Amino acid sequence: MALSNATTGLRRDSKQISIFHNENVRALIVFLSSLGLFLLFWEVGARAEWFTRGVPTASATFKELWWWVTNPFFDNGPNDLGIGWNLLISLRRVAIGYILASLVAIPIGILIGISPVAYKAFNPYMQLLKPVSPLAWLPLGLYLLRDSEKTGIFVIFISSMWPTLINTAFGVASVDKDYLDVANTLGASRLRTIFKVIIPAALPNIVSGLRISMGIAWLVIVAAEMLLGTGLGYFIWNEWNNLSIPNILVAIFIIGTVGLLLDSLFAALEKFVAFGRNS
Amino acid sequence: MRSASVNSSSPTDQSSPLPQLSIRNVSKVFPGKRGLFNKLSGKTSRDFVAIEDISLEIEPNTFVSIIGPSGCGKSTLLNMIAGLSSISEGDILLNGAPITGPGPDRGMVFQSYALMPWMTVEENLRFAVETVDPTLSTKGANRIIKEYIQLVGLTGAERKHPHELSGGMRQRVGIARALAINPQILLMDEPFGALDALTRGFLQDEVERIWEQQRKTVIMITHSIDEALLLSDRIVMMTRGPAARVDEVLEVPFPRPRNRETIEQHPAYHALKAEMESHLFRETRAVEEARMSR
Ligand SMILES: Nc1ncnc2c1ncn2[C@@H]1O[C@H](COP(=O)(O)OP(=O)(O)O)[C@@H](O)[C@H]1O
Ligand SMILES: [Mg+2]
């Protein structure tokens, strides 16, 4: 939206006003100048040793980032692995756990949402388990599975299940009664109503559940991997043991960027299934 | 003209003495909350009698409007006819057979349009047509869809989604969808209630035009006296709730096809309008007074 506004700004009337009146342009200016100030403060502060000793300068950190990004795939053993490999390892774990969780959560959410009794009966479980910190599942996973790789996936699975489950059940349970009335007056079968009306109507809720779950999965994997042998989380833990602060900052930046990309993907999907509804 | 005299056939159809729809001593009671559980939580409430002992006979090919103060039970009555709401007492017979649930012999137009936002105009109609007749070939369905999109003047908007349409266009889709399943009776619950005055007038003219072509039995709920006078053969005026009844049924003698200007010239126009105004005013004032003294 914002982009198309800016590009269609070629219209005569809007061209006469200075482009600095455009909200997006102004936001970009504030963003860039605050970023510049921050980097300047960091660089000067680190050089003047305003912070704790050992804090790298901004320029050193960027050099480091450049090196890691241009050499993503090398493999000198588990403690010296390119960031690309670590990223792929983390993404793979997230993908497996998250997809399994979604495959379980969406059908169960639909079943729970369809029946008012089931919705009321199972809601306490969902509400109770939702706020449990994902890491609380870690010991349980290790005990049950006795394997760090499987435990990582288990933790992703169990913690990224609840938002999808809750949102799906809620979306299905709160389908606009008018849609159901339409299906009823036409004499649609239960199955046809579920597939043609209820699920499409609940889709925006389902997708926003998936989006929250994805965010959680990405948060959790980094923490969980500190206790596992590979992945971005382990990379950070390892660099902390090496006391390599620039590398930790590089990893934080990469984790943030990937999280942002994943979230944008789901934001686009949300828009795609909304059809003018704003949920 | 009390409700008892309603059985006389309508002026548009003298040949058919059999009513298409008979509403016989129908009441609707919304049950209150009772039982131990509700008593403990202090949430008990008494039964609510929304409408009581309504009788009405509707002959084929008549356009009937129901008008009454807000909250009197018009939607409740229409939903019972549609089969969406259970009948507490009495019977509603469609062609002599009691109504037990919803069915495609009755098409419904909703005030909120109730179009599926994820379906295009065409898909909304297709959903209705294919649900009602699953054996229909794609070609047959396409033909029906095209015909009804044309009937409501939406040609060119087939591929659009509802959110890309204006309110008036959306309700055209709603009307097309209800008619496309070829129901015996068309039920409309304040179909133009959410539209601005200009669009509303425009759509009323459209409904008048379509009705002249199809002459289906229509039951329409409305708040608008002008709308009722323009479109109806008969106007059912309901009293305020609770326990709402039919107060009076007016015959509208204007010849068809009608339009706004010519009906105003008709000698009966002003008397009918005054009658409806005084009825609505009286009932609405009583509702307000009851609310204040509570
Ligand atoms: N499901 C329900 N349970 C209890 N009361 C209801 C229910 N639906 C409607 N009512 C009551 O029945 C009365 C008639 O409602 P309605 O038929 O919607 O009125 P109208 O369409 O004439 O404005 C109102 O007083 C409303 O509060
Ligand atoms: Mg109503």
Image (spheres, helix red, strand yellow):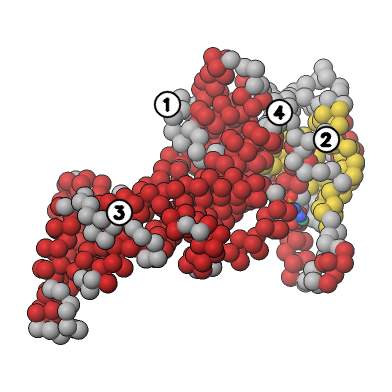
What residue is pinned by disc 4? B104
Dot placed on the residue nearer the N-terminal end, 1 or 2? 2
Which chain is mark 3 on?
A
Query: Is circle 2 on the same chain as circle 3?
Result: no
Dot placed on the residue nearer the N-terminal end, 1 or 4? 4
What residue is pinned by disc 1? B156
Circle 1/circle 4 CB separation < 8 Å? no
Disc 3 marks which amino acid?
A: Leu
Image quarter of residue B85: top right
Disc 4 marks which amino acid?
A: Pro
Query: Is circle 1 on the same chain as circle 2?
Result: yes
Classify mark 2: helix, strand or loop.
loop
Classify mark 3: helix, strand or loop.
helix
Q: Where's residue A197, x and y in %?
A: 59, 38
Which chain is mark 2 on?
B
Which chain is mark 4 on?
B
Circle 2/circle 4 CB separation < 8 Å? no
The residues bearing labels 1 and 4 have C-alpha atoms spaced at a distance of: 27 Å
For disc 3, the neighbor class at 10 Å (few under 14, some 14 to 19, many from 20) is many
What residue is pinned by disc 2? B100
Q: Is residue B202 visible?
A: no
Which residue shows up at 72% across the image and 38% down it? Answer: B65
Query: Is circle 1 on the same chain as circle 4?
Result: yes
What residue is pinned by disc 3? A87
From the image, state whether disc 3 or disc 1 is nearer to you: 3
The residues bearing labels 4 and 3 have C-alpha atoms spaced at a distance of: 56 Å
Disc 1 marks which amino acid?
A: Gly
Classify mark 1: helix, strand or loop.
loop
The residues bearing labels 1 and 2 have C-alpha atoms spaced at a distance of: 39 Å
Circle 3/circle 1 CB separation < 8 Å? no
Disc 2 marks which amino acid?
A: Thr
